[in-house]
Amino acid sequence: MSQGKSLALDVERNFRKSQQAQEAEPNLASGVQPVEPLWVTEIEDRIVGFLDYVRVEKGLAANTVEAYARDLDKFSRFLEKKGWTLEGTGSAGIREFLSWLDGQKLESRTIARQIVTLRHFYRYLRRENIVASNPTENLESPRTWKVLPKYLSQEEVVTLLKQPPTDTPLGIRDRAILELLYGTGLRVSELISLRVADVHPEAGYVRALGKGNKQRIVPVGKLAVAVVEQYLAGPRNRLLGSRASGYLIVSRRGGKLTRQAVWLLLSRYGRGAGLHKRITPHLLRHSFATHLLARGADLRSLQMMLGHSDISTTQIYTHVVTERLKEVHHRYHPRERHISRGA
């Protein structure tokens, strides 16, 4: 059985399990007629076909496929409650679904992602001649990023980076993880997928495999390079023991480190640093981008380093820097201080 088909079957099983488990689903409409099991299966089959398509033909990463599956799970359950078919759901129906999501107090970013998923899904359905028209063509995304990305100050980053001990193999490995996350802005999935051959300390860059299996070159600073070289010089081999691995970051048992393990160690070091923030890999990615822009980096270069396909995704960091400048102006400009004292 192919990997794509196996994933599709897993997703289909998960759909059915989730539908059985959702006993307290919101009352979307009164008087909804029960949906025939065959009709429900047809929707699921369309979704499974789409997930196979983006996984096998488009080559999207497993995390992206899983996100699509979660979004379409919500959508399929909504259609089931309403008694609607895919073919019969027009733009008004899509908007009603998005309105329901908004009523669940979901962040605009989550709803915007749902719109992206539906657009890709209906383009696939149209391409396969399953639907006659695409009801998502004229949808407008909600204004995203109502809450600007959180990030650490430079002082907080320095404190965090000092937390891992430097006298144990795991401590040196963890320091390399922190330095790479902050020094390159890599996603956690990209970090744990780095292979030793992807790291070029002498040239000062790593080759990362991002979303859609797209490779990019990301510069690495001298401090991060020094820690990675220290890790490669001995601690990594001690963690491997007699085992062999091509991955740069390995676990205490010599295997590939998981995303969950990275989250846990970041959380632990964040508490050790006394930081009253939830320390995550993406927080370090936000900090990387914000600090570069604040020190004069141009937006296009930052887009390339972050691996954003659309520069509008990168532009959010300009808003972060702008808000910070306004805060500094309000705090330190003499006229602002004069007004705040009520003189």
Image (cartoon, rainbow, N blue to C red):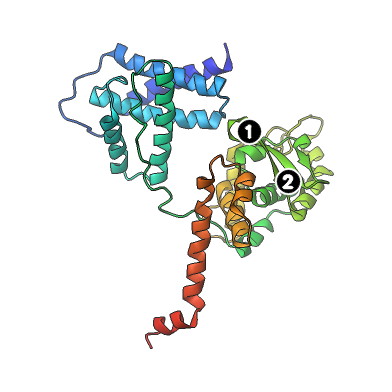
Instruction: State how far apart marks 2 and 1 are (Cα).
Output: 26 Å
Q: SS at mark 2?
A: helix
In x, y percent, where is residue 171?
72, 49
The image shows residue 335 at horizontal and vertical percentages of 45, 82
Residue placed most toward the observer, 268 or 220: 220
Q: Quadrant of residue 13?
A: top left
User: Which circle marks residue 338 in the picture?
Assistant: none
Q: Amino acid at mark 2?
A: Arg
Q: Amino acid at mark 1?
A: Lys
Comparing marks 2 and 1, which lies closer to the viewer?
1
Front residue of 240 and 129 = 129
| Mark 1: few/some/many CA within 10 Å (<14, 14-19, 20+) | few
Which numbered disc covers residue 173? 2
Residue with the mark numbered 1: 214
- Is 144 drawn above or below residue 54 in the view shown? below
Question: Which is nearer the eye, 335 or 66?
Answer: 335
Q: What percent of the width, then of the height, locates residue 65?
A: 50, 28
Q: Quadrant location of the C terminus?
A: bottom left
- In this rendering, would 88 be left or right of 125? left
Under circle 1, the secondary element is loop
* Residue 13 visible here: no
